[in-house]
Image (cartoon, helix red, strand yellow):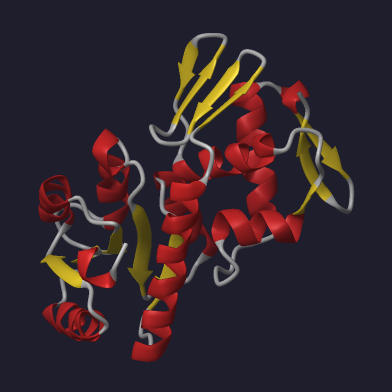
Amino acid sequence: MKKKDIKILLVDDEPDILEIIGYNLSAEGYQIITAENGIKAIKKAKKEHPQLIILDVMMPGMDGIEACEQIRKIPDLSNTIITFLTARGEDYSQMAGFDAGADDYITKPIKPKVLTSKVKALLRRLKKEETSEAVLEIGDLIINREEYKVLNNGIEIVLPRKEFELLYLLATTPNKVFKRDEILDKVWGNEVVVGGRTIDVHIRKLREKIGDDCFKTVKGVGYKFVD
């Protein structure tokens, strides 16, 4: 996909932030759409189907966390990449964002060159997703990447985006041990700083929803999906 065909939705209640980020990304050749709050962001996302949404966390009316949760419920936007833009760097804020379905985090203020590099890295993930196998079937478990849907024994299981990405990664190669660094790189991106417990928390949630026997911990190394 060419840059001129890529739509980026910027959402922030500060006009200066929208102007600065919009200007720099427009200069790179992307189509830029803006919204001032979460409610307008959802409406524009439904209408425009952006490939990337850069979403502020702290906004009046509807904050970024709630807006992200609502966007993730829209089937047509299941492959849209969402990254939060925030001045807050606390672990609890990041975990709330990831649980809501975010793919990444950008902390402001951010230099224009760093921002454009970050956006390019995020969009490369989109390209990888497009070339990935669409559906994995392992026993009674079906993982549909295009629809972000998981069926276990015919029962649909709703997973936040990061839990889905982690499950999909491990299930692509059953019985292979994925190292923790590899999981962080492929699921969260090597530019994201997350705590070491992040993977453990997501694995625990997957065990509760998919089955404890499906995941094995290899102490000091990482995790694997057991078929």
Residue 188 placement (x, y as % from top left):
56, 58
Query: Residue 108, relative to residue 148: is it above or below?
Result: below
The residue closer to the viewer here, 96 or 47, is 47
The residue closer to the viewer here, 196 or 119, is 119
Query: Which quadrant of the figure contains the C terminus?
Result: top right
Residue 90 seen in the figure:
yes
Q: Residue at x 27, y 83 (%)?
A: 28
Q: Residue at x 33, y 51 (%)?
A: 80
The residue closer to the viewer here, 116 or 66, is 116
- Looking at the image, residue 208 sits to the left or right of residue 144; the answer is right
In the orientation shown, which residue stands out farthest toward the top? Answer: 154
Residue 159 placement (x, y as % from top left):
48, 33
Query: Which quadrant of the figure contains the N terminus?
Result: bottom left
Query: Residue 179, relative to residue 90: is it above or below?
Result: above
Residue 88 seen in the figure:
no
Residue 64 placement (x, y as % from top left):
28, 56
Q: Residue at x 19, y 80 (%)?
A: 26
The residue closer to the viewer here, 31 or 223, is 31
Residue 136 sits in quarter: top right
Query: Residue 212, relative to residue 122: is it above or below?
Result: above
Looking at the rendered structure, the number of numbered marks drawn on it comes to: 0
- Looking at the image, residue 153 sits to the left or right of residue 55; the answer is right
- Looking at the image, residue 202 sits to the left or right of residue 37; the answer is right
Residue 21 sits in quarter: bottom left
- Looking at the image, residue 55 sits to the left or right of residue 157; the answer is left
Residue 221 placement (x, y as % from top left):
86, 52
Q: Residue at x 16, y 55 (%)?
A: 41
